Image (cartoon, rainbow, N blue to C red):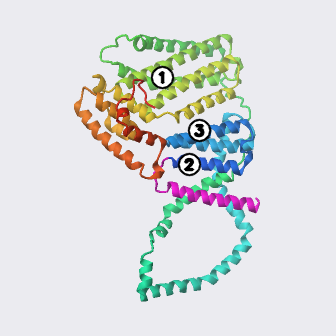
Amino acid sequence: MSKSSIATKITLCILLVIIADGLFYKQPIGWTAGLYAGLLLLVLVLLNRQLLQINASKLIAFCTATLIIALIESPQRLTIGLIMVGIMTLLILQKRKNVGCALLWLKDIAGFLTQGFGQWYKDFCKIKRISKKGRTVNKIQFSYAIIPVSLTLVFGFLFAEANPIIAQALDGINWELPIRLLSLWRWLFWFMTGVVVWALLRPRFSLSTTLTPSTGINLDRWLNQQTLVLSLVLFNSLFALQNVLDIVFLWSGETLPDGLNYAEYAHAGAYPLFVTSVVTAVYVLLTFNEHQPHYQTATAKKLVFLWLGQNIFLLLSAINRLLHYIEVYSLTYLRIIALICMALTAVGMALIFARIYSNRSNGWLINSNALVIAATLYASCFINMDSMIADYNVRHALEMTGEGTGVDLPYLRGLGSESLPALRWFQTNAKYSPSQTIQAGVLITELENELSSSTENWRAWTWRKQRQLTIKSTPTQAVPIGNSGWQY
């Protein structure tokens, strides 16, 4: 640990903490989140040119930079989280020099979080030991200053009491800033920011050891070739019954039994079917991994392929059920997450099929699923979910179609200014509830005022808010959303 290197990093850490204080402490989050993330990435790259030495690092840096642009467009917690993961991955790749497997990467991330954020204390102890002698001298010199400084303050107070000119000058001083700087919460903010920045500037953590090959779980006590085949026959029969019922009532539109509507049918089955597929995946991975070759007869493989295919269809039915439910009861964040999870599980089932068919390892399967999940999260950062939800809900509301449920204005209020285009369209086109259009007009006024006031602080500005203000100031563009059904 050279003195010049550590001094440079201490200086950079202090500067980054000061910048964070000016941008974020008791301030609204806007484009400044992207600015600070970009500054962090730039400092790390300039401080260590080997950070982008391999192709994988260059790809991660490019993806992180595009996420920073998305953060300037509109800050989201998911985007901030992925940027932090991207930066940590760059620091891990600098040490490991190769991509490795997803499980090793997760262990490295955990190691960074548990060891890296305690690096400040380790370095503090080292510096303390090195400068112990000099610090003793400083203590003695500091004691020499106590009496002069104390008497200076006393004399200053007395002169202020005795001289109105000095008193008036002291009254003109703004003492608010020093008081704010002494705030406990501000010191805590500085400390936490400093800990994070120092962990990135001094990434001293141990890489995880290579994963030892697992011998798998011994299932011979509960299964053999015959019982595995029998279980797959039973599972396929049960799944076939469920899928036939879905084909008849869900996909073909056959009349449901008395007392049951499509929304109830859809809602009752969506989440249990999702759990069923997860249980299926665990069972297949335990019995058809590379450590259980004695179970994998030709008959068993055919049956497990059929079962996986039925599971994929089951998940598609679960997605269809949830879409039916959304048509009646509107779209929400949780329902979007459920749809994404079901789609990812279906892709996972297809990857399990590919793993067994091509005789690949569970490591290949884990890496493939990790890439699919990472790509999904990355793409989600560039989708305006708030606007999408608001647009869908107003277009399928009772006030627009005459069926289903009425528009949930409080929920749209919670989405913020992103729902303004949808609310303007609703106010103009809703035909079944004049009272709701009046309430929508009140809500539009509130959101427009909030949008205008939020941009008065330069830190809260975002590219998306600027576009909304531009649309507001252009009446010809303000009313219609379009006929696509989605608004981005």
Specify whether residue 381 is in view: yes
Q: Residues within 10 Å of mark 3 (few under 14, many from 20)?
A: some
Q: Total number of numbered labels?
A: 3
Q: Quadrant of the N terminus?
A: bottom right
Q: Main secondary structure of the magenta part?
A: helix
Q: Nearer the viewer, residue 132 or 38?
A: 38
Quarter residue 411 falls in: top left
Q: Magenta stretch containing residue 183, yes or no?
A: no
Left or right placement of residue 461 versus residue 100 in this view = left
Query: Could you tell me which secondary element the residue under label 3 belongs to?
Result: helix
Q: Counting residues from the N terminus, which is met first, the one under dot 2 or under dot 1?
A: 2
Name the residue that disc number 3 marks: 66
Residue positioned 52% across, 12% down in the render: 237
340 up-or-down from 46: above or below: above
Which stretch did the figure color magenta?
1-30
Amino acid type indicated by mark 2: Leu
Q: Is residue 396 above or below residue 63?
A: above
Residue 184, position as x, y percentages in the image: 49, 64
Q: Position of residue 247 (x, y in %)?
A: 44, 11
Reply above or below: 432 against 173: above
Upstream in sequence: badge 3 or badge 1: 3
Nearest the viewer among 366 and 151 is: 151
The kind of residue on which mark 1 rests is: Leu
